[in-house]
Image: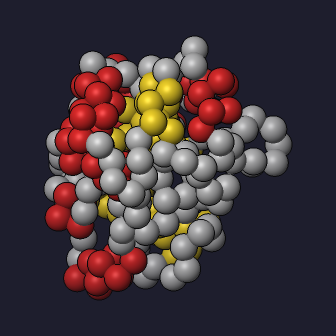
Amino acid sequence: MLLNIHPETPDPKRIRQAVDVLKKGGLIIFPTDTVYSIGCDSGSSKAIDNLARLKGVKPEKAKFSLICYDLSHISEYARIDTPDYKLMKKHLPGPYTFILNGSSNLPKIFRGKKKEVGIRVPNNNIARELVKELGNPIVTTSVHDDDEILEYTTDPELIEEKYRNHVDLVINGGFGNNEASTVVNLVNGEPEIVRQGLGEI
């Protein structure tokens, strides 16, 4: 099912409709400020298992991220020291994934040996309103084509055609970007760029 939501001024009723799907343990595809993402409620381990199955990985080996609403929301799930906080405050919301040391509130899937988590606050009203309405972070992974070259699908209608039998809802929030977020590791104190994407540090 394709649900149209205006990217600048998301209709609260339609956001609630999408969040109802998440609360029931469903998988949804939604826009961010970079590429379209597949996500689920971080409070549903069954949904996270389904997301891992869709990506063809074991849940404990999956490189999923959490989408949070803002910095104070992040601090519930990760430990942030002052220099990192300043760096993140300067760049968020924005096209970045920050890898941080997790707190004890992390969903079970992220509590492996390393207990690290990639966290995003995308500069996209649809993604953030979904998180706000849900009350939990969204566990997420990018939508990209299966070929060797990582081509990101930007057209939500084509994404819906491809994934309609695998997810419960696709949100059409306009064309997405075809470049992923910049990944910055903050675990060891010094910012380390793991992947250069859309965001400049």
Residue appearing at x 45%, y 36% in the figure:
4
Q: Position of residue 75 (x, y in %)?
A: 19, 62
Residue appearing at x 28%, y 84% in the figure:
86
> In which quarter of the view is residue 84 placed?
bottom left
| Residue 101 appearing in the image | yes
Q: Position of residue 160 (x, y in %)?
A: 59, 27
Q: Position of residue 8 (x, y in %)?
A: 39, 57
Q: Nearer the viewer, residue 19 or 188?
A: 19
| Residue 137 appearing in the image | no
Q: Nearer the viewer, residue 175 or 67?
A: 175
Residue found farthest to the top: 165
Q: How is the image coloured?
A: secondary structure
In the figure, 127 relative to 122: above or below? Answer: above
In the figure, 3 relative to 84: above or below? Answer: above
150 relative position to 160: left or right: right
Residue appearing at x 43%, y 81% in the figure:
190
Q: Nearer the viewer, residue 130 or 77?
A: 130
> In which quarter of the view is residue 99 placed?
bottom left
Residue appearing at x 47%, y 66% in the figure:
96
> In which quarter of the view is residue 140 placed?
top left
Q: Position of residue 170 (x, y in %)?
A: 49, 30
178 relative position to 138: left or right: right
Q: Nearer the viewer, residue 193 or 74?
A: 74
In the figure, 155 relative to 192: above or below? Answer: above
